[in-house]
Image (cartoon, grey):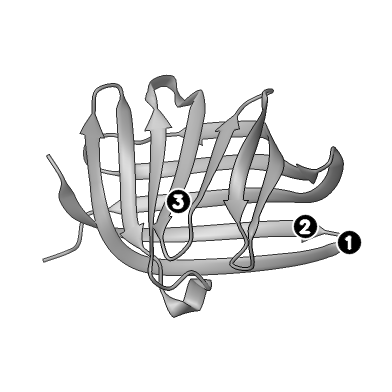
């Protein structure tokens, strides 16, 4: 059953010695289907992906996280610890195929919410592009 939740996302990207941190507070839906949890929310102008819808799928056992964007921007990133996936990423200026190597995945998600953290490297033509980490907190709104 889908329920509306408060979502706090913190992202860190390190590229060429530069570190960029982004934090987003939004509302969205949280639900369980089969053996996976899903976090779904609409992007905004603040994220640079206005008009896109993002769904994060966390497979049971926290072995794999899949991030899909649909709408104005289409992309899919698969993060799996110790596995390199080739993924399609829409930069807004065109599509590129990038390598995604999962570093770590940690989840305390329950039907009530919780935390998800994961890290990954991005490469283009096998050359390191950036190191990334994402922390997502899901909680029910206070009445």
Residue 143 x, y percent position in the rendering? 10, 66
Instruction: Tell me whether the residue at label 2 lies in contact with that at label 1, contact meaning CB atoms closer than 8 angstroms.
Output: yes
Closest to the observer, 136 or 48: 48
Residue 17 x, y percent position in the rendering? 89, 61
Which SS class for mark 2? strand
Instruction: State how far apart marks 2 and 1 are (Cα).
Output: 6 Å
The residue wearing badge 1 is: 17
Above-or-below relation of 90 to 126? below
Closest to the observer, 28 or 42: 42
Instruction: Kindly identify the residue that appears in the image at 47 percent across and 44 percent down.
Output: 67
The residue wearing badge 3 is: 136
Point out the image quarter for the N terminus: top left
Residue 46 x, y percent position in the rendering? 48, 78
Left or right: residue 126 versus residue 96 is: right
Which SS class for mark 3? strand
Name the disc covering residue 14, or none: 2
Would you call the spot at circle 2 few (<14 residues within 10 Å), some (14-19), or many (20 or more)?
some
Q: Quadrant of residue 34?
A: top left
């Amino acid at each position: 059953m889908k329920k509306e939740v408060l979502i706090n996302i913190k992202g860190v990207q390190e590229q060429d010695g530069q570190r960029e941190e982004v934090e987003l507070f939004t509302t969205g839906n949280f639900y369980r289907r089969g053996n996976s949890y899903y976090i779904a929310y609409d992007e905004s102008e603040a994220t640079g992906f206005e008009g896109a819808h993002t769904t994060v799928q966390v497979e049971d056992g926290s072995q794999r996280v899949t991030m899909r964007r649909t709408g104005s921007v289409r992309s899919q990133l698969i993060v799996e610890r110790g596995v390199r996936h080739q993924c399609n990423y829409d930069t807004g200026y065109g599509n590129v195929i990038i390598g995604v190597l999962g570093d770590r995945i940690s989840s305390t998600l329950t039907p009530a919410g919780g935390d998800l953290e994961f890290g990954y490297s991005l490469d283009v033509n096998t050359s390191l592009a950036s190191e990334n980490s994402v922390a997502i907190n899901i909680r029910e709104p206070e009445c």
